[in-house]
Image: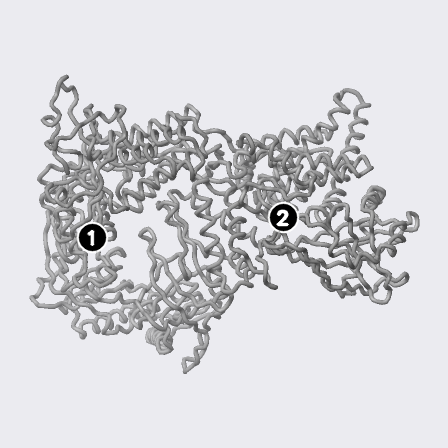
Amino acid sequence: MAAAGCVTVALHVAEVLETIVSGCLGPEGRQVLCTKPTGEVLLSRDGGRLLKALHLEHPVARVMVACVSSHLRKTGDGAKTFIIFLCHLLRGLREITGKEKDFFPFENIQTCGRHWKNCCQWKFISQALLTFQTQILDYVMDHYLSRHFLSIFSSGTKERTLCRGSLEMLLGAYFCGRVGRNNHNLISQLMCDYVFKCTACESSFEEVLELVDDCFVELKVGVTGLPVSDSRIVAGLVLQRDFSVYCPADGDIRIVIVTETIQPLFSVSGSEVILNSEAQFQTSQFWITERTKAIVKHLQNQNVKLLLSTVKQPDLVIYFAGLNGISVVECLSSEELSLIQRVIGLVPFVLPEASSQYELSHTALVKFCKPLILRSKRYVHLGLMSTCSFTPHCIVLCGPVQGLVEQHEDALHGAFKMLRQVFKDLDLNYVTQTSDQSCTSGPRIYKNSRESNELPKIVNSSIQRSYQDTVVKNKGELAKTQTNLKVCSNLIVPSVKLEKNVLCSTPKVAVTDSYQTDETLRCSSPNKGRIMDDHEPFIENNSANSKTENTRKEISYENLQVTKLARKDSILPLRYKSLEMCTSQSYYFSSIPAGCVLPVGGNFEILLHYYLLNYAKKCQQSEQTMVSRIIANALLGVPKILYKSKKGNYSFPQVYVRALQALQTNQPMISNQTGLESVAGKYQLLASVLQCLTNILTVDLVINIKRQPQEVYDQDSEEEL
Amino acid sequence: MSRLEAKKPSICRSEPLTGERTRASLAALRGLVTSCYGPAGRLKQLHNGRGGSVVTTSQSAALLAGLPVSHPVLKVLTAAVRNHVACFSDGGLFTAILCCNLVENVQRLGLTPTTVIKLNKHLLSLCTSYLKSEVCACRIPVDFSSTQILLSLVRSILTSKPACMLIAKEVDHISTLILRAFLLTIPENAQEHIILGKSIIVPLKGQRVIDSAVLPGILIEVSEVQLMKILPIKKSDSFKVALFGVSLSGDLSDTGEGTLLVSYEVSLENAALDQLFNLGKQLVSDRVDLVLCQKVIHPSLKQFLRTHHVIAVDRIGVSLMEPLSKVTGAWPIGSLGSISPNSYGSIKDLCIAKFGCKHFFHLIPNKTTICSLLLCNRNDTAWDELKLTCQTALHALQLTIKDPYVLLGGGCTETHLVAYIRHKTRNEPESVLQDEGCSQTELQLITDAFCTALESLAGSLEHDGGEILTDSKYGHFWSVQADLPSAVNWPDLLSRCGCGLYSSQEELSWSFLRSARHPFPPQTCLSREATGSASTLTLDCFTAKLSGLQVAVETASLILDLSCVIEDTN
């Protein structure tokens, strides 16, 4: 396949995929029924799962699916948006190039040359895309978009405490896109309850989420045949097996875990047992019995009431355990064992070598231990007493068919993944060029900068923000950054001019003049009505590894109620002097702080669209303008689908126009949606899509091999699909 | 991995419900389940050309288990029904028919899935909250002081399964047996948590249904050869029982993973046998009367035990172990070496009984909640059907104990619910419209579709071309023969309503179920006198039907929500 047709072909493929996934997008999305080769049916609205189920053959399609799944592994969300966005980007690219070359005569040798020229052109565009993704996107996110961010953490306290209302909105929006319409409220409520029930103290959400994400399979029980509304949360841990022996016990219940059979083996592997007489055999059998009896008896003396075993115990052990009032659960999986160990910190009991007296130190207490009957199937229900911040609870998911239960399980698991991402900071870094001129103008403005706290107008009145600059004192990191710097600076040479414009448009740059105390300074662009938290570096001329110390500063706005956004900007500013250009490059390291969210319903897309268009207007370089425009327009694809079924005042053009007006007049955007979505997730999605597109564009030839792959056990990413 | 083939691409179909194929298969399934419904339902004969027995049935459990479904949409539907049946035993056909009806009715309207699902959910919650409320007039609280209601429930379940081939007298007999078997499983001194016992169904094919019986304790089948070896049982007021879970065959037990080197002339088999004899000696000295073994007992040990007047029965199987342990109080022994005296149990009496051509050991317990239901029927298929029905009935009784209500059967609950919903949505639509944000017309359309689905469900009880009427006071179900004379006096023609609660002499007014009617408020709050006066009612299990209703609506919503189907053809 020729690269010239590449975009067209890729667009065809993406359009086909788009028609499938757009049907499931958003709160109005519908279900897709997948049949497995085994004949089972599965209901799904999960984009990643659908794409996998299609078993696509087309090479471009396979590239796309591979990109989607690698994105999903990272974030666990956004597969459908990925495809839609990619499709719109390709559409945008084709429109532009289509105007220039409508014809492709592939007859003579000359065209062959043209073909390679085309390839070069695509290569060029993809380079521009990559530059955009690594440079401009971060810049726009940090400078413009960040003022609209809300946080899911509640205000008022120093520590990050999760606000229940915000969490509900975040989860509600997530499940709207994942499970059936009649169930999403129920499931998101269930999950919200679960998160709060499992968390012992407010500050340990991250730890709990990590544990739940890792061990989700062990923490849920699927029950088919009951209505979905019967789903519930049960306190304690439910093991998906029955007791081998159950002896009702109450009060003080001690448990031990064993990983080997309690009954001594007649012979161990690799050894030889020589039997010279029948009596010898009988004696050894007798000894085995007595020994087993002694161990079990000892366990009983230590008040052990429950034996958890990872292996199958022989009849003899079961018999003696039953006689001594010890319940036994056998064949625990290693995952269940590790979960129990994580929760109660219990180490498996090691059988002593000698049969004399020994101390039994590895026991733990449980609150209760009883059979739980769900749909006439018996499970083991343990009331573990947690030693970590996770209070064990299990989710019982009911549904009329297995396929639906699985869908809910997947959605819940994905939601935990997504929440984990929300709780993480996401780093942004970008380069801006500062001309000498602006540097010199710095000292003049510096005097105002102290008072600048009061200066800016509040853009989003409902949001309180405090920017906190952390102190960075790390020589090693600094050095590392410098090496990065060199690499980066080589990459960005072609777009240097362009970036120069960026800072020229932000007219007032304040620079500190205090050379003694390495101070931070702040650039503010009052015309935009906000404070930019840029920190101009101070570096002594000759020393490359100077310490940088940012003073802590807090800027508080006046009317602040709803949310507080704690920003931790760890900034390592450096100045790079380029001899030829006479400009200095500033490297900014900022981040999207944990818990940043925006209202759903295409808010992120419209905002980014608006700022990218603004950016494109200012940008003089045609290439970057073009790329920004294409991306800006493609971003609208998602909200267009979301608002497709809405009429009148809520139709897409109306919403769009209202949003733009609000942005232009610096008024808060009004959203009629109640859900929230993670900013970091969206940002990562955008980055992944751009990388995927670059990937597709840079390929000039697809070589079709019709032979068995030689190394079948090769770890190919497509294997997993 | 020797085989690595590229996967074939899947087939993707969008809008699966509008296709002709889906519509046809859905209609076929609906026809199938509808024709089976109710006491007058037609039987289906499942015959697999590749082998296996021919099944004659009208129950959803047997029907759907043997019916391979290829269409993905139908797979969802039948899976939902089968899962429901696995949970509740009863109400499978009800769920299947309602779900098919709902999908077909709503599909015809062509409204957006969002509205349909929202409104269906709302109507469902209207139904469930009414059925659970105190004012509900199609729900009867169960009076445990008399057996009347429970007996009626069992009878209704038996009569609704025509493939059992029972005549009226047999129905009476079997329903009494089932109720008795159930009552035997309830412990006498019940505390807060009742742990029900178990009734074991013992097959006895080829006998008259009337010969079926309920016996307390456990029946263990023994062959005639075995019986001859067993000596006459001595009379005693208590028998000591040893129950073995471990094999007594004298095989070498697990010798570990190492290598075993055995000197010449040393026989481990003899050693193991010696061990068994020692065990036998211990049993004899402990004065055990009966040895039961899940697995095999070595013939020598059997011989040894017999000479010491100990009865030995082996190959009992794992399924009987738990009940046996409960009946005798014995702990299953897992050791060949030492036996703790606590692990012995006892029974009150032991006798040999002969039913039909089969011989049984009958273990009569002192006091326990285990009983055996000896079930007879003429042929295999009818017996299978009867067994399934008995299990259903026993399960329904258990569910009724948990939630002590029953619903009126015979179509009356459905027609009554329809009257209630129609009245409610016509007179108080504001609450719905406000919450769900849809128009009055949409609500009316969906309500109609929902109610028609319930009505035609009730209507499928009638298979002989008769007409169905409903009264305008209680909203109950009345059926009348086909080919009526033009001018009729309804009260003479109709005798009682579907459930048997009301008689036609009550000065009611009737209208055809299919005709358009004006919505009316059905009378709520069932009076005690009404339920007391009627002798035989047709009743349904409350829990099973309620859950069936929910599952049917949820599954229908699920199917209506499908935007495309991806079929993996690998």
Establish if B168 lies above or below A460.
Answer: above
* Scheme of colours in the image: one colour
Q: Are the numbered discs 1 and 2 placed on the same chain, yes or no?
A: no
Task: Name the residue type under label 2.
Answer: Val
Numbered label tally: 2
Residue sitting at x 9%, y 45% = B211
Confirm or deny contact between disc 1 and disc 2 (CB under 8 A).
no
Horizontally, residue A562 falls left or right of residue A692, namely: left
Residue sitting at x 37%, y 49% = A230
Q: Nearer the viewer, residue A3 or B50?
A: A3
State the image coordinates of residue A433 (x, y, percent, origin top left).
83, 48
Q: Nearer the viewer, residue A669 or A255?
A: A669
Q: Nearer the viewer, mark 1 or mark 2?
A: 2
**Looking at the image, which residue sits at the far left?**
B235
How packed mark 2 is, by other alpha carbons closer than 10 Å (few <14, some 14-19, many 20 or more), is many
| Chain letter of disc 1 in the image | B
Quarter-wise, where is residue B545 in the image? top left
| Chain letter of disc 2 in the image | A
Q: Which mark is residue B397?
A: none
Give the alpha-carbon distance from disc 1 to disc 2, as whole Å.
Answer: 61 Å
Horizontally, residue A362 falls left or right of residue A673, namely: left
Q: Which residue is mark 1?
A: B200
**What secondary structure is found at the residue carrying circle 2?**
helix
Q: Nearer the viewer, residue A127 or B124?
A: B124
Q: Which mark is residue A679?
A: 2
State whether residue B489 appears in this view: yes
State the image coordinates of residue B35 (x, y, percent, origin top left).
25, 29
**Looking at the image, which residue sits at the far bottom?**
A357
**What secondary structure is found at the residue carrying circle 1?**
strand
Horizontally, residue A543 falls left or right of residue B178, namely: right
Task: Name the residue type under label 1.
Answer: Ile
